[in-house]
């Protein structure tokens, strides 16, 4: 369970990204965070795995106050939280399986890392993770030869391989074409249902959020202005989240 | 044809299990091992001859001398205005590099065009490439030693040496620029009814100038460094005096020459990088 | 309607002296044309050439006058004395060994320093600038001068040459490498940190796979240069082919020199082709 209590976040340059955020997300929920760019969507995600520090208030994950974690403790905590990026952040020169195997690196000893020695179990587990997202056949292909959608799946497999309880996805489909974007969203839905992993994703396209996610959180200028089941959101509420501008829609891609 | 396609489709459709995939993994470890072994073998082989035999009798004093020279350079020599002082020698070194580069850059133009496969038929182009390669392979010092026999020692020898040496690298880079020429421009000029001369003037030259100038400046950078060593064989510049001082162990003088040289090369390298990046941005 | 784009053009000191021309079309639209810098650049280059000619005492008539001497030398060079080959092999092998060992040592030292001089990995500005300055200083020193000092300290022979090549390689590879490291994708590093890896684990699994091929490619390229460079180090007594070359020129045995240069040419070309092939595979 993720719980935000009166969370404020101010960046060193003085910009206040989050104002009095209160949230409660249960294990296994599939949540979309919507809002304009710069509204604070990314900040919410990055506070959860402490890529950013919270300025004021408390953020607890499974009863642990994230802000008190330090060094090795923080790294151990981050093992439970997977993160997916808009630009995939894969080593594009390496094969898919090598990228997935990097998920094991934080638990390995110095020399194992130095020489890149992975056991058979680790390799099998990495292949299984690739199988879960349906790109087992590309396991030994270099990532720069894969399409955008396939690369995002490799990134998803890498995250699955670390056996997370929560997956944070920062604009996971923003650099994909409409058809692949939908396929990747379906992958997320499946993983959420099959493995009971909480998924929080930032998403720019309102139609995708409403179609695939259970719960929608609308952020406007650092404040939460909507929080409820995706089915209940009204057009007025959407307009309010998007500050009166037209909500971006992905369409069907045809 | 259709059969082949079918085969490929079948291979794609074939779903392999995790275990099968693991069994089919590419085994590349032997490549890495081989590379490491080869490097290790080469190092071992080379290490067997190159051996540390301790310092020479005067080794320690030379090392101390060099350090004291660099920390206490001869300031009078460094800022003097005479013919044997650092500023004059640096200017002379620069003069050698300037002339060597400009002559080399001009001489390289015919070589480059003659060796470009999109201008001349391949056999002729490759013949000229061998000539260019030959020029490039012979070290500049060897060129200098040969030219000295012709011109006698002095700065003029340095100029000739650098003019010849520069041809190698400059024409190699010119060739790349020429072979990258955008020929569609020539087509459009043709369509406008331009003569061959007009085509070269407005279609070819504008495309080449920036990269040619950039190459020349880059080579000037190299030539300047090279000109400092040419003096060692008597081809003028600061090198001759530096080596003389080193051999006669006048450390303070060595210090001032080394400082002068480092500062000059640093300044030129900085300027050359700036100008070239400006050229690359098209200003 | 007014010339909006005028403000977009950055005026430099040059434009303040030579005012840009304003061209107004009949319909009132106007644009500015900055004065061309070409005349002033050409004038400066011409001035540099004239000064350099005076300083070096370069005279084309020497070449014309001594043309027969040059031809004589060239003819002899192109008739290599095959029997001399036996005496070339040993110093040639020495030269190659010096290059291999020097390249390996220099490259090994260059890797950590290059990582520490990359602004995207090393956030400490002071360390970055100090290291870069030292690297720049090392690069300004001519290899031959380093070799001479090494020979004076460690005695004549291959050890001095190897040391000189190591220093030279270190300076160049470290620079090329930190420039490449700064262009790598830091996304995977961020991903590794988000996964709970410490800085070393993240660097080693996310950055090193990107750096390694570039590093090997730079090392091979430097090895190519080193074979050519080390061929002349013998001139100052640092072992290898240089001694033989110097000796042949001293005795005016140009047929023998021709043989030495031919062997060097073949070896350099062979190494260049292999290295180019390997570098093509790496990218």
Image: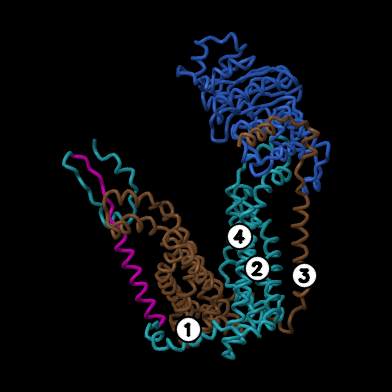
Chain colours: A blue, B brown, C cyan
Nearer the observer, disc 2 or disc 3?
Answer: 3
Q: Which residue is mark 1?
A: B84
> Who is closer to the viewer here, B4 or C241?
B4
> CB under 8 Å between callouts 2 and 3?
no
The answer to whether any part of residue B268 appears in the image is no
Nearer the observer, disc 4 or disc 3?
Answer: 4
- Are dots 4 and 3 on a single chain? no
Determine which quarter of the picture holds residue B53. Answer: bottom right
**Magenta segment range?**
C28-56
Please state the chain letter of the residue tagged with numbered disc 1 in the rendered image. Answer: B
Q: Which residue is mark 2?
A: C167
Going by the image, does B99 lie left or right of A101?
Answer: left
N-terminal-most mark, 2 or 4? 2
Q: CA distance from mark 2 to mark 4?
A: 24 Å
Q: CA distance from mark 2 to mark 3?
A: 21 Å
Q: Which residue is mark 3?
A: B45
Residue B172 included in the magenta stretch of the image: no
Q: CA distance from mark 1 to mark 4?
A: 44 Å
Q: CA distance from mark 2 to mark 1?
A: 29 Å
Q: Position of residue B234 (x, y in %)?
A: 52, 84
Q: Position of residue B144 (x, y in %)?
A: 52, 81
Q: CA distance from mark 3 to mark 1?
A: 46 Å
């Amino acid at each position: 369970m993720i719980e935000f209590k009166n969370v404020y976040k101010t960046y060193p340059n003085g910009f206040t990204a989050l104002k009095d955020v209160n949230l409660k997300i249960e294990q296994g929920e599939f949540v979309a965070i919507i809002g304009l760019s710069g509204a604070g969507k990314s900040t919410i995600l990055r506070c959860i795995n402490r890529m950013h520090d919270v300025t004021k208030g408390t953020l607890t994950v499974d009863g642990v106050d994230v802000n008190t974690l330090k060094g090795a403790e923080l790294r151990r905590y981050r093992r439970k939280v997977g993160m997916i990026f808009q630009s995939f952040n894969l080593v594009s020169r390496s094969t898919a399986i090598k990228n997935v195997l990097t998920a094991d690196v934080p638990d390995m000893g110095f020399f194992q890392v130095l020489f890149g020695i992975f056991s058979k179990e680790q390799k099998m587990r990495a292949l299984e993770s690739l199988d879960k997202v349906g790109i087992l056949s590309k396991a030994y292909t270099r990532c720069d030869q894969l399409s955008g959608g396939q690369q995002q799946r490799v990134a998803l497999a890498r995250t699955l391989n670390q056996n997370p309880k929560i997956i944070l996805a920062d604009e996971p489909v923003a650099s994909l074409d409409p058809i692949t974007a939908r396929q990747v969203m379906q992958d997320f839905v499946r993983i959420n249902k099959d493995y009971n992993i909480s998924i929080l994703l930032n998403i720019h396209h309102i139609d995708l959020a409403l179609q695939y996610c259970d719960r929608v959180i609308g952020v406007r200028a650092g404040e939460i202005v909507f929080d409820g089941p995706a089915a209940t959101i009204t057009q007025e509420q959407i307009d309010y989240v998007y500050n009166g501008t037209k909500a971006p829609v992905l369409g069907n891609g045809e | 044809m259709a059969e082949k396609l079918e085969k490929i489709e079948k291979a794609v459709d074939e779903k392999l299990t995790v275990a099968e995939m693991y069994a089919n993994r590419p085994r590349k470890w032997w490549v890495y091992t081989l590379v490491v072994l080869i490097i290790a073998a080469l190092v071992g082989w080379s290490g067997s001859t190159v051996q540390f035999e301790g310092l020479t009798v005067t080794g320690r004093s030379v090392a101390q001398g060099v350090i004291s020279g660099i920390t206490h350079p001869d300031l009078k020599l460094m800022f003097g205005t005479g013919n044997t002082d650092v500023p004059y020698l640096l200017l002379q070194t620069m003069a050698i590099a300037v002339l060597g580069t400009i002559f080399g850059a001009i001489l390289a133009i015919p070589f480059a065009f003659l060796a470009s496969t999109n201008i001349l038929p391949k056999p002729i182009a490759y013949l000229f490439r061998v000539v260019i390669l030959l020029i490039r392979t012979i070290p500049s010092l060897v060129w200098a030693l040969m030219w000295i026999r012709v011109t006698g020692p002095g700065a003029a020898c340095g100029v000739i040496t650098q003019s010849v040496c520069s041809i190698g690298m400059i024409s190699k880079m010119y060739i790349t620029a020429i072979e990258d020429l955008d020929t569609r421009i020539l087509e459009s000029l043709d369509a406008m009814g331009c003569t061959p001369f007009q085509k070269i003037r407005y279609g070819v030259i504008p495309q080449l100038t920036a990269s040619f100038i950039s190459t020349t400046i880059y080579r000037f950078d190299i030539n300047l460094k090279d000109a400092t060593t040419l003096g060692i064989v008597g081809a003028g510049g600061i090198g001759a005096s530096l080596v003389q001082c080193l051999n006669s162990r006048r450390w303070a003088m060595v210090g001032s020459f080394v400082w002068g040289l480092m500062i000059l090369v640093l300044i030129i390298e900085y300027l050359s990088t700036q100008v070239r990046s400006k050229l690359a941005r098209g200003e | 309607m007014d010339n909006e784009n005028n403000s977009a053009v950055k005026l430099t000191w040059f434009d303040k002296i030579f005012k840009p021309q304003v061209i107004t079309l009949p319909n009132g639209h106007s644009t500015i044309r900055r004065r061309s810098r070409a005349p002033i650049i050409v004038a400066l280059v011409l001035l540099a050439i004239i000064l350099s000619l005076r300083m070096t005492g370069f005279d084309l008539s020497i070449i014309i006058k001594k043309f027969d001497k040059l031809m004589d030398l060239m003819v002899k060079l192109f008739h290599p004395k095959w029997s001399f080959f036996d005496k070339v092999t040993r110093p040639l092998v020495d030269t190659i060994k010096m290059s291999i060992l020097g390249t390996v040592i220099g490259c090994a030292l260059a890797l950590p320093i290059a990582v520490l001089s990359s602004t995207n990995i090393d956030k400490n500005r002071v360390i970055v600038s100090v290291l870069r300055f030292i690297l720049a200083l090392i690069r300004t020193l001519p290899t031959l001068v380093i070799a001479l000092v090494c020979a004076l300290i460690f005695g004549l022979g291959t050890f001095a040459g190897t040391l000189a090549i190591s220093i030279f390689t270190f300076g160049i590879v470290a620079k090329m490498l930190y420039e490449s490291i700064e262009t790598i994708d830091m996304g995977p590093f961020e991903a590794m940190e988000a996964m709970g890896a410490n800085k070393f684990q993240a660097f080693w699994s996310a950055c090193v796979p990107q750096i390694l091929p570039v590093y090997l490619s730079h090392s091979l390229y430097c090895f190519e240069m080193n074979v050519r460079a080390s061929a002349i180090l013998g001139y100052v007594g640092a072992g290898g082919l240089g001694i033989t070359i110097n000796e042949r020129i001293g005795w005016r045995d140009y047929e023998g020199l021709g043989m030495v240069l031919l062997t060097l040419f073949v070896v350099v070309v062979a190494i260049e082709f292999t290295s180019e092939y390997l570098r093509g595979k790496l990218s």
